[in-house]
Amino acid sequence: MAARNSNSRVPIGRKIDPLLPYSIMSEKTKKPRLRMRSLLGHCHYRRVLTWLLAAGFLVTLVFVKSRNSGYNVGGYLSKGSRTQAPIATATVVNSNGETVVMLTGDMDGDGKLETVPEDEYVTDDEKKERLEQLQKMPWLKFPHLDGYFHGLRTIVSKVNLQPEYPNTTDKAPLPSPAMSDHVPKPQRYSPYDHGSDVKTCYLDAKKTVPAPDLYAYNGVPQHMPDPGIGSFKLLGIRDDICFDRFSRYGPYGLGYSRAHGGLDTGLDTESVGSETVWAETGKIDYTEVNWAEAQDACYQANIHRFPQVDASTGELQNNGKKGRIAVVIRTYTGFKWTELAVLNFRALINELSLKSGGEYQVHFLMQVRNIDEPIWSDKWTVQRIINDNVPAEFRGLVSLWSEPQMRLMYPGRFGETIENPSGADIHGIYRSAHFPLQVFALQHPEYAHFWNWEMDMRYLGSYYEFFDRLGKWAAKQPRTLLWERSARYYIPAFHGSWENFTDTVQKDTIASGRAPIFGPLSFEGKAQLRHDEWGQTMMPASCGVDADRSKCGVGEEADIITLNPLFDTEQSGWVFSDDATGYKTPPPRRCAIITASRLSRRLLMAMHEEVWRFHHTAFSEMFPPTVALHHGMKGVFAPHPVFLDRAWYPFSEIDAAFNAGRDHSTSGPGSPFDQLNEHNHKGTSWYFNSEFAGLLWRRWLGYAQMDGRGRGGGRANEGRERGGKTEELDTTSSGRLCMRGVLVHPIKFEHPSEKP
C-alpha cells in the first residue's frame, strides 16, 4: 500500500433513477371535462365504453368482497385528448397463486385516481407486454406511497404519527395531512454518550473552531411510512426525529457560498428557515480544513481512551479499553468529486471521528487504474496521483493500491475456480476487492475493526448513531442460531416482534432437519490456519461445553456485520455463487450482497492467510462471510431500516418475495438474490439495483425528479416531474422533505446537472 491515504461491482443491467409519488398538483395539470359526443361517435370508443361498464361492474363485485384485491398500476389517455380515459382492469396471479384484479390507474397525493398522458390508446400487443411485465414483477401492482414526500409543515410528534405504511386500518395512499402555518426550527442533535474523559476536537490547528453539531427536528412528517424491512427501535436508532437537507448538511457548507467558506451548493433550492443551523456557529469556513491533521490531533487528545500496539508483538494490547475502528472508503483514480460528495464525507469524518473523540478514523483506499504507475517506487508519483484525483482537504487520508501490487502481495498459482462468470482476473477489483483491504489491515495494526465503505452510499442521519448502534446491537446477539437468523430479512409487519421472529427461525430450522451452524465447520480441503495449529479457538468462553447456550456470544464483538442477509449461495441463482478458487472441493459458502460491512482484524488476518498461504479466495461479497463461517467466527446481519416505495399488501407478500428461499430464508433455491428475483429490490431504499434510493435522495436534496408513476405500474424516469424549488415554495406545499435516518444506495448522481 502506498502513502497515506475499489470500486464496487457494477452489476449487469443496473438502472439509475427513480420512482416517486404525487403531492400537490399545479393548475396546468388539470384536465378538461370529457366530451361525450366525441367519445360515442367513434366505434373504437364505443367498444371501450362498453368494456368499461362491464369491467366496472366486475371490479365493484371484487371490491365488495375484499378491500385488498385492488391495486393501481397506471392510466391511459386517448390520442389528442387531455380528458380522462376509461379506467381498465387487469388480472394477474401473485406469488401466492391468488388471482388479483387491478385498476390501471394510480393515486395522486389526495387519494384520487390520476392518469398519465399518452399519445394514443395502448395497443393489444402493448397490453400483452405490460401484463407479462406485471406477472414477472408483481410488485408493480402495489400503489405508490406518498408519505415520504410530505414536508416540514406537516411534522408531528411520534405519538401522533399515523404511518401511511405498514398500516392495518387504512389503505395507502392516505390523504394529504394538515399543514402548519409555520416552519419548525431544528435543534442540535447529539447521539453520543460520552464521559468526562472525552476531549473536544477541532477543525483547525489553533483549536478555535470546534467540530460542529448536526441538527434535527423533533417529530416526523405526518404519514411518514415505517420501514417495510428492518427496524429503528430494534437497533436503538431514534425514529422520533427527522433531518432536512440543511439540518443535516448546513453545518458542513450546504446553503452558503464559497466566499463564506461554503460550496455554492444548495443555493438553488428552497431554504426557508435554514439560517437556524448557523445561528450559534456562524457559517464555518472550510477553505483551509485539513481532515488528516484534524483527525490525528483528535486522536492524540484522546489517546488515553484507546489500546495501543504492543511494540514487542506488533499487536493491540488487550487491556479492556475501547478498540478503534477504521472506516475505509474505496475509491479509484478518475472518480468525479462533486460538491455534494464533499459534503457527505465532511459529515462522515466529523461525526464518526471528531465528534466521537477519535473512536473512528476515516481513510480513502484509492485504486490506481494505470498499472504502469510506480506507486511503491516514487513518493512524488504518489503525491501527483493523489493531487490529481482528490480534493485538497482529503488528500492526507489517502492510501494507494494497484493490481500489480496485489500480484506482488499474493503471488503464485491459485488453482481451479469452480466458475468465473465475469471472466475477470483473480487480482482485480471486481473479484477480489478484499485483497487491498487485507493489506491495509496488515499495515494498520492500531485498528480492531474496519468498516468497508463505498463512495455511492449516503445516510440521512448521524453516521455515528448508525455505526455505533449497529456495533452495539451485534455484540448483544447470542451465537445460537445466529447464522440462521442472519440469513433472513426481518419484516416487522409480518413477523411481529423480534422475539417472535427468533422463535419462527428456530421452528423453521427444526422443521428443516438441518443441523444449525455452531462453531467452526469441518469439510474436505478446509485450511488449517495458524490459530488452529496453535490450538486457539475463535469461540468465546461464554460458549464453553458447560455454558448456557442462550448466553453464548452475548457481549462478544462481531467479526463481520453485514447490511444484507448472509445467505447460502449454493443453488441460490446468484450470478457469482460458484466463484470460489483454490479449494479441493466446493466449500460451504455464505455471501452478503453489497460489500459494505464491518470486519474484525482477526477475520481480515484469517482471510489474508487463506490467500497467501493456501491460495483460497472467492468473489468479493462472498469471501469475508465464507471465511468467518469456516473458522467459527461471529457473523451478524444487522436488520437496519429499509423503506419500500409502494404499499405491499398483504404483508405476507414482502416475506414471499424477500424470504422465498430454503426454509423461509434468503438461501438456496428461491433466493431474492437470484438474477430472476432481484427486481424485487428496485423499489427499496438499499440495494445495488434500487430505483427508489436515488429518487428519494434527490427529492430530499430539493431537486425535481420524474415521479416514476405511470402506465403498467410506473418505473424509473416515467411519469411527471415533481418536487424542486418551485413546488416546495408553493403556498400549497408542505415544504422541503424531512427524513428519518436511513441508508440509501446506490447514489450515482445528485445534482440534476450530473445526470448521465
Image (cartoon, rainbow, N blue to C red):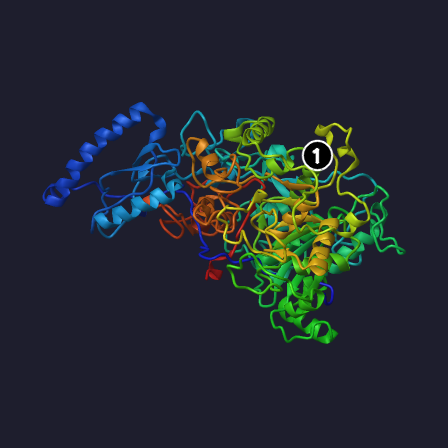
Q: Is 715 in front, or is 117? A: 715
Please determine whether, in this image, residue 555 is positioned above or below residue 503: below
Q: Nearer the viewer, residue 146 or 483?
A: 483
Dot 1 lies on which element?
helix
Q: Is residue 242 left or right of residue 146?
A: right
**On screen, residue 744 above or below 543:** below
Amino acid beneath label 1 = Lys
Quadrant of residue 464 in the image? top right
Q: Quick one: quadrant of the N terminus?
A: bottom right
Pick out the residue farthest to the right: 312
Instruction: From the viewer's perspective, tell me whether residue 746 is left or right of residue 726.
Output: right
- Rendered image quadrant of residue 677: top left
Q: Is residue 482 above or below residue 593?
A: above
Residue 197 visible in the snapshot: yes
Residue density around tag 1, few if under 14, some if 14–19, many if 20 or more, within 10 Å: some
Q: Nearer the viewer, residue 47 or 564?
A: 564
The residue wearing badge 1 is 476
| Residue drawn where x is 72% and y is 40% of the image | 192
